[in-house]
Image (spheres, helix red, strand yellow):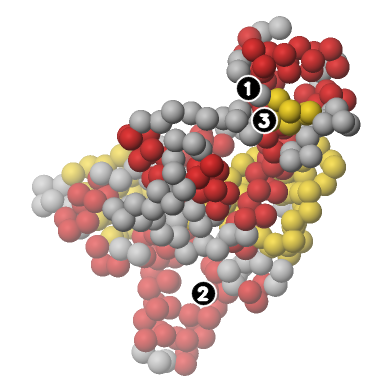
């Protein structure tokens, strides 16, 4: 057996023993790992040889011992863990509790007045853990999804989760949507009533990190096109030093402004990104993106002018771009 495959199975075995308070029998472990019973016994022996304490009860259910994980951490490592756990504390309170249980970190010492991470998302912890488990175990889930624009109503989704991505301050579930028959990004804080099914799916050759690095925002619809946006010298430096997409490259202009090039689909996320820079950004190409940005600007102007006719145009624009299927 290749060593890499054995390492993966041992890692999975530790996860199973760690995540089940009641423990696992050898039979259930064999089923989860897809190996014979004799192999499970060998793996359990391997864990003991590695110094990992295992406990079992009268039903011969195995679980990790309470002293199985007890690392010694340097001050720098503690700071790194504190930074990580504060970044996800609102999403996964379990991470904070887990770190507090480590013997080398005293309870209450995780607060650092020199670090603060803020997110507007309020994600249900059980939703997060169920979806993460489903992605890890390749199990189809069903859930209710309420888009940000509630007039669209709640939609029931059947979903094969590939993983969870954090982008621009929000957490997204990425995977194959059965109804749309394509890969979608759905905001975690808009997911409710998750049901973990017994149906297993075959995950395609899908690299979550690579997929995220090639997406501009949470929407990746349509064919990519060449996009060029001019930025004023006021914003040029910030734009040049920020890596938003793998395809991006910049051209510095003599007056201090720059041309920002990339190849992505024209989506609502792209429109909102350009609009967010106000008069410091101007779409050079494509014409489709330019017209959408102009339409958005006119809609905003119409609202502020209290013009009823322009207000109707604004509502029409919002219906198309905010609730018309471009954004999940």
- Which quadrant would residue 44 be assigned to in this image? top right
Q: Is residue 27 left or right of residue 182?
A: right
> Which residue is labeled 1 in the image?
52
Check disc 2 and report the residue beneath it. 317
Give the percent coordinates (x, y) of residue 133. Answer: 69, 42
Asked if residue 27 lies left or right of residue 48, the reply is right
Check disc 3 and report its element: helix, strand or loop: loop
Please identify the quadrant where the C terminus is shown. Answer: bottom right
Splitting the image into 4 quarters, where does residue 298 fall? bottom left
Q: Residue at x 58, y 69 (%)?
A: 148
Cα separation, mark 3 vs mark 2, equals 59 Å
CB of mark 2 within 8 Å of CB of mark 1? no
Relative to 268, residue 318 above or below: below
On screen, residue 295 above or below 12: below
Residue 303 at least partly seen: yes
Extreme residue toward the top, this view: 1
Crowd band around label 1 with a 10 angstrom C-alpha radius: few (<14), some (14–19), many (20+): some
Q: Nearer the viewer, mark 2 or mark 1?
A: 1
Instruction: Name the one closer to the observer, 282 or 7.
Output: 7
Labelled pair 3, 2 in contact (Cβ < 8 Å): no
Which of the marked residues, 3 or 2, is nearer the chain's N terminus?
3
When asked about the image quadrant of residue 62, the answer is top right
SS for tag 2? helix
- Where is residue 201 shown, x and y percent of the image? 78, 36
Q: Image height check: is 2 above or below 242?
A: above
Q: Which residue is mark 3?
A: 65
**Residue 196, x across and y down, in percent:** 78, 48
- The reply to whether dot 3 and dot 1 touch (C-beta < 8 Å) is yes
């Amino acid at each position: 057996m290749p060593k890499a495959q054995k390492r993966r199975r041992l890692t999975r075995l530790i996860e199973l023993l760690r995540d089940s308070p009641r423990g696992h029998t050898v039979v259930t472990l064999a089923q989860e790992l897809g190996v014979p019973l004799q192999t499970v016994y060998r793996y359990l022996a391997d864990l003991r040889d590695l110094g990992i304490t295992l406990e079992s009860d009268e039903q011969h259910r195995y679980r990790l011992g309470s002293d199985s994980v007890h690392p010694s951490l340097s001050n720098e490592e503690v700071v790194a863990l504190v930074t990580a756990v504060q970044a996800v504390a609102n999403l996964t309170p379990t991470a904070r509790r887990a770190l507090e249980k480590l013997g080398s970190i005293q309870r209450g010492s995780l607060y650092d007045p020199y670090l603060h991470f803020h997110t507007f998302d309020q994600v249900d912890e059980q939703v997060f853990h169920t979806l993460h488990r489903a992605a890890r175990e390749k199990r189809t889930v069903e859930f209710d999804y309420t888009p940000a624009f509630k007039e669209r109503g709640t939609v029931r989704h059947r979903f094969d989760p590939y993983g969870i991505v954090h982008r621009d301050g929000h957490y997204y579930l990425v995977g194959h949507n059965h109804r749309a028959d394509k890969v979608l990004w759905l905001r975690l804080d808009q997911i409710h009533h998750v049901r973990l099914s017994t149906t297993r799916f075959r995950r395609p050759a899908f690299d979550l990190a690579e997929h995220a690095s090639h997406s501009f925002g949470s929407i990746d619809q349509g064919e990519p096109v060449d996009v060029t946006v001019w930025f004023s010298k006021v914003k040029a430096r910030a734009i040049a030093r920020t890596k938003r997409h793998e395809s991006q490259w910049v051209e510095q202009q003599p007056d201090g402004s720059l041309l920002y090039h990339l190849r992505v689909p024209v989506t609502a996320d792209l429109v909102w990104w350009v609009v967010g820079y106000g008069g410091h950004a101007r779409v050079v190409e494509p014409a489709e993106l330019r017209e959408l940005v102009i339409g958005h600007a006119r809609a905003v102007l119409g609202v502020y002018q209290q013009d009823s006719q322009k207000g109707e145009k604004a509502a029409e624009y919002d219906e198309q771009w905010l609730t018309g299927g471009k954004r999940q």
